[in-house]
Structures are given as structure tokens and as C-alpha cells.
Image: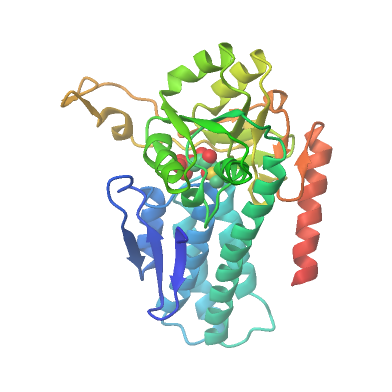
């Protein structure tokens, strides 16, 4: 099933509750856009493309919830809902991209009646979700072409079906290579502090029969230095125009060690995650999350840190493009200089969408 999906019979949003996995598979239902905002913030739904789709459907809910009968009043309510949804997580650009896309559709001059705006937003959110799945499958094909028979792949965080509407980005590449019978093995970083690798990627690998080994984040360097990794695939929450990649905390360290050991390092990035307005990764806002994510963990039934420990909890880091071998997009795999190659494929995909509209 899709991680984010609209229920057309009951007019509500359904999302897999990722906080419960791998112990419990449960589907949460949403009729209020404010609850969608909380679900994004608290990571019931997470992963850049999934957050974007959740926010898009959140806008459709906001349109339904609005009592407005006229166009202007509805647009004002939608603007307010957009601000609430945008205030949830700052790093993943798909959030802002998806909400702005819904606002643009709502503001189309040819749509006059409030109910037609409501319908148009839902249709656009559905299209965005459908496109996400199709884009992921194209990226999977492009990325799997880089995988050789028998490769061991290093993967960070969760970038699979759960992080997207369906299929996935980096883990989607792994899934496709596995389907192609390439006899691959994947090393999954557990990905502290929220453990998306252990909780979610390991669960997904079991769903798709992908052979995996779960490793502590700190072990990745050892596996790379001892020749046990052939290629790295990671996701991205926002990629700057120069190819600097913001992704789950710990990605930077992996990329540096990969380069030191001559291991190719490929972020898998839909063009919707590329932010051409930012010249470099230094301009990407990095989310700082609740210290409790680090301290409220127990080992042998006891807390792992002193009660008043001072905590730093950046959720993402930036990998400078000099550590990036190439970037897998739905268009093609691009290589340095990224200022030129990345812009070319982003613009090509944007033009395609404009022609289809
Ligand atoms: O904090 P999260 O779990 O939302 O972070 C997710 C990641 O860092 C992923 O690698 C990224 O969103 C790309 S996955 C499609």
C-alpha cells in the first residue's frame, strides 16, 4: 500500500504510522490539516517526498475544512493552512514545493467557485502523489544500472516506500537491483537517533526479500576500509544548485569515508528535491530536533544519559559536492560540474510538466 493515500469514499487522508514500525503496522486517518502538520512534525510520516505528499493532501483537507463560500475567503484560509504546514520541518524542500504547488493551483484565475478550487487542489495532490511513484521507478531504473552483480551496497536512514508515496529513492534503487537478480546485499546503517534504518529500512527489506545486514552507524567506516562496500546510495532532503546534498545526519561522515576509500557515493534525488534557488548547501536550513530523541532511549532497562545532559540534535547534515560521485535523478545520472548538469535535468523535467499541464 502507499504510505500516503486519499480515501475517496470517506474523504480523508490515510498514512502509515511510521512511529509504530516495525512492531505494529497501523494506518492513521486524518480529517484535520492541523493534525497532518503534527504528524509531519512528530514523524508519523517522514522522508522528503512523503512529507511533500502529506502536506499536499493536508492542503486538500484544509480546503474541505474551510467554511468559506467565496473564492477570496477560501484562498485566505488556504494561505493560513499553508503557513501551519510549512512550520513543521524546515529542511526537506519537498514540503514547501508541494504546498506552493497547491497554492498556485488554488489561485488559478480560471477557477472561480470555491468548490471548484477544493476539487482542483485534491486532484493536484493526487497527481503529485502519482507522479512521485512514477518518478521513483524511473530513478530506480537509472540507479540500478550503476549496480554490478554481487555488489554490497551501503545505505543510510530510510529512503524506501515509507519515505515516499511508494517505491522509494535510494532504497528503491536497491529494490530494483534486487529484482533484476543482481545478487546484491545491503548494509543498513541503523541511523541514530530516530533509527529509521533499523526500524524502517530493515522492515522494508524484509517485505521485499532484500538480503540485508543491520549495522551500527559507527561501523560503516570499518566496513568501507576493509573492502566490504562496493557502492553507497543515500537520499536527500534538499540538494543545492552546486550539488551539495542535505540528508539525514551522518551522511556527510559516510561520504568522506567513502571518498577516502575510493567507493562511489550516489545520492538518489528526484528533481523536486533540488533547490536551484540555493547556490550552496551552506544556505540549507538544518532542523534541530527535540533532545528527548537522544536521551529518552534505554539500554538494559536504564536511561542512556544523565538526566540533565546537554544535547545537540541536528537532524540533517550537508555533504559538500566534492564527495559526491554522481546524482541519480529521474531524468538521468548526472556528474560534476553539478551547477550545469543538475540545472539541465531539473529544467528538462520542469518543462515536461509544463507541457503536460
Ligand atoms: O528525518 P527524516 O526521517 O524525514 O529524514 C529522511 C531522510 O533523510 C531521507 O534520506 C530523505 O528524506 C530522502 S528519502 C526519500
Q: In this view, does 20 lie above or below 60?
A: above
Q: Residue furthest left?
A: 301
Query: As rendered, which of 352 and 88 lies closer to the eye?
Result: 352
Image quadrant containing the C terminus: bottom right
Residue pictured at 41% horizontal, 30% vertical: 190
Image quadrant containing the N terminus: bottom left
Residue pictured at 58% horizontal, 59% vertical: 98
Is residue 54 among the parts visible in the rendering?
yes
Where, by quadrant of the figure, is residue 67 drawn?
Answer: bottom left
Q: In this view, does 230 lie above or below 330?
A: above
**In this figure, what is the number of numbered marks?**
0
Residue pictured at 54% horizontal, 81% vertical: 119
- Rendered location of residue 230, percent (x, y): 63, 24
- Rendered location of residue 36, percent (x, y): 39, 60
Where, by quadrant of the figure, is residue 246 drawn?
Answer: top right
Query: As rendered, which of 242 and 178 lies closer to the eye?
Result: 178
Where, by quadrant of the figure, is residue 256 drawn?
Answer: top right
Q: In this view, does 68 lie above or below 231?
A: below
Is residue 80 among the parts visible in the rendering?
no
Q: In this view, does 213 lie to the left or right of 282?
A: left
- Rendered location of residue 77, percent (x, y): 47, 72
Query: As rendered, which of 340 and 5 lies closer to the eye?
Result: 5
How is the protein colored in the picture? rainbow
- Rendered location of residue 2, percent (x, y): 47, 61
Q: In this view, does 160 lie to the left or right of 38?
A: right
Amino acid at each position: 500500500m502507499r504510505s500516503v493515500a486519499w480515501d475517496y469514499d470517506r474523504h480523508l487522508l490515510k498514512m502509515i504510522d511510521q512511529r509504530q514500525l516495525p512492531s505494529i503496522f497501523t494506518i492513521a486517518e486524518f480529517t484535520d490539516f492541523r493534525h497532518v502538520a503534527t504528524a509531519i512534525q512528530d514523524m508519523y510520516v517522514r522522508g522528503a517526498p512523503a512529507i511533500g505528499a502529506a502536506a499536499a493532501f493536508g492542503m486538500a483537507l484544509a480546503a474541505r475544512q474551510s467554511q468559506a463560500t467565496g473564492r477570496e475567503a477560501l484562498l485566505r484560509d488556504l494561505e493560513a493552512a499553508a503557513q501551519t504546514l510549512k512550520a513543521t520541518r524546515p529542511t526537506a524542500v519537498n514540503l514547501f514545493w508541494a504546498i506552493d504547488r497547491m497554492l498556485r493551483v488554488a489561485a488559478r484565475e480560471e477557477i472561480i467557485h470555491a468548490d471548484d478550487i477544493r476539487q482542483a487542489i485534491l486532484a493536484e495532490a493526487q497527481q503529485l502523489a502519482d507522479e512521485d511513484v512514477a518518478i521513483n521507478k524511473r530513478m530506480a531504473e537509472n540507479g540500478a544500472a550503476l549496480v554490478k552483480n554481487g555488489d554490497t551496497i551501503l545505505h543510510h536512514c530510510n529512503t524506501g516506500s515509507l519515505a515516499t508515496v511508494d517505491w522509494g529513492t535510494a532504497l528503491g534503487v536497491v529494490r530494483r537491483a534486487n529484482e533484476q537478480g543482481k545478487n546484491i546485499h545491503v548494509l543498513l546503517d541503523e541511523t541514530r537517533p530516530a533509527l529509521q534504518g533499523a526500524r524502517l529500512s530493515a522492515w522494508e527489506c524484509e517485505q521485499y526479500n532484500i538480503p540485508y545486514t543491520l549495522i551500527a552507524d559507527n561501523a560503516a567506516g570499518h566496513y568501507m576500509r576493509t573492502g566490504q562496500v562496493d557502492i553507497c546510495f543515500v537520499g536527500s532532503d534538499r540538494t543545492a544548485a552546486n550539488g551539495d546534498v542535505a540528508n539525514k545526519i551522518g551522511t556527510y561522515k559516510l561520504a568522506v569515508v567513502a571518498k577516502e576509500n575510493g567507493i562511489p557515493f550516489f545520492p538518489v534525488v528526484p528533481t523536486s528535491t533540488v533547490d536551484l534557488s540555493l547556490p550552496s548547501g551552506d544556505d540549507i536550513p538544518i532542523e534541530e530536533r527535540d533532545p528527548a530523541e537522544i536521551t529518552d532511549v534505554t539500554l538494559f532497562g536504564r536511561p542512556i544519559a544523565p538526566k540533565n545532559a546537554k544535547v545537540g540534535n541536528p537532524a540533517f547534515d550537508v555533504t559538500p559536492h566534492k564527495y559526491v560521485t554522481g546524482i541519480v535523478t529521474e531524468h538521468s545520472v548526472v556528474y560534476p560540474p553539478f551547477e550545469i548538469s543538475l540545472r539541465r535535468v531539473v529544467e528538462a523535467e520542469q518543462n515536461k510538466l509544463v507541457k503536460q499541464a
